[in-house]
Image (cartoon, grey):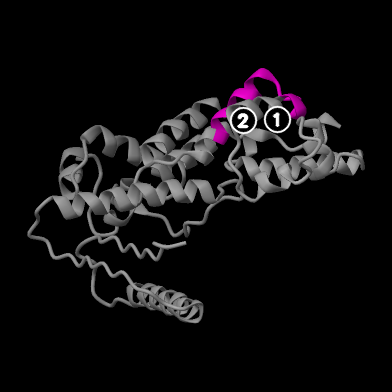
Amino acid sequence: MKTKLPSVYEYNNFRKYLSDYQNARQAHDPGFSKSSLSRILGLPNTRSFFTDVLKGKKVSSAFIERFVRVLELTKDEAQFFRVLVMFNQAESAEERELYFDQLISLNKTPKRVMEKNIYSYYKNWYNGVIRALLHIYDFSDNYSDLARKIYPEISVRQVKEAIVLLEKLGLIAKNQRGFYKPTERSITTPNYVKDELIKQYQLSCLEMAKQSLVKSTSMPQTISTNVISVSDGAYKRIEKKIEKFRSEIRSLVHKDEKPATRVYQLDIALFPNSK
């Protein structure tokens, strides 16, 4: 049965892992239900505990250890699970960054090398920027010049690491003239890249937006903020407007008849300020 249970290393969300584990184990043992699992965890009078955890209830360090025992995790699996829980429950970008790096080093899956590359791609905002910049800049080996063309400017070491990473992922390749250019392959996230990785990428992009506000620049930029109060119906209409706008932007970029001259990042955020 052990080999048929999901591997914790394949997950970036511990709640999804717990759900899949419980379903897989119940398929072999019908008595391993959500309510019985709550009792095994030491909560005979709280049958909904496990269900509440799957819905977002925070798990304490004591219950993390109880889960480790119930899941029968090995020493390495247990350490990965502990860090995964802390990563998912982190309340600040700094905490997420700390646990994110630990997840990379602790991952023991057969796909470890590729997965580490995927983690690295979504960790740093400038990887996507460099890929886009190579559309309009002929780069072969002048890393210093490429670093200066990126805003906010990054180090030569970061540029070198990004080029190596993008080439490994097949997102760039040298053309007949010896210049690195984006490949024709479209960027899609692999099946094992979950929402948590995308969230980490979005955090790094928002951090860059913050830097753009703080640092003065002569380059044109448009940044606006609106706080609004709306009904549920109006919110749904706004969502549809945003999606339509994003679609129109993608179409405009795709059909742009003139050569691109610079790289921009477009962030759209609509999030609650009231409960």
Mark carried by residue 67: 1
Which residue is at 80% across, 37% downward? 37
In contact (CB < 8 Å): disc 1 and disc 2: yes
Mark carried by residue 75: none
Residue sitting nearer the eye, 221 or 69: 69
Mark carried by residue 81: 2
Image quadrant of residue 29?
top right
On whether residue 82 falls in the magenta region, the answer is yes
Between marks 1 and 2, how big is the CA–CA gap? Answer: 9 Å
Disc 1 or disc 2, which is closer to the eye?
1
Q: Does residue 238 lie above or below 215 as drawn? A: below
Q: Does residue 88 lie above or below 104 as drawn? A: below
| Residue 154 appears in the rendering | yes
Which residue is at 38% across, 74% downward? 229
On whether residue 197 falls in the magenta region, the answer is no
Residue sitting nearer the eye, 91 or 74: 91
Q: Residues within 10 Å of mark 1 (few under 14, many from 20)?
A: many
**Residue type at tag 1:** Phe
Point out the stretch of residues depicted in magenta: 69-85
Q: Secondary structure at mark 1?
A: helix
**Which mark is first along the chain, 2 or 1?**
1
Q: Pinpoint residue 64: horizontal percent, then vertical percent.
A: 64, 29
Q: Pinpoint residue 113: horizontal percent, then vertical percent.
A: 53, 32
Q: Pinpoint residue 114: horizontal percent, then vertical percent.
A: 53, 37
Residue sitting nearer the eye, 58 or 67: 58
Q: Main secondary structure of the magenta part?
A: helix
| Residue 180 appears in the rendering | no
Which residue is at 53% across, 51% downward? 195
**Residue type at tag 2:** Phe
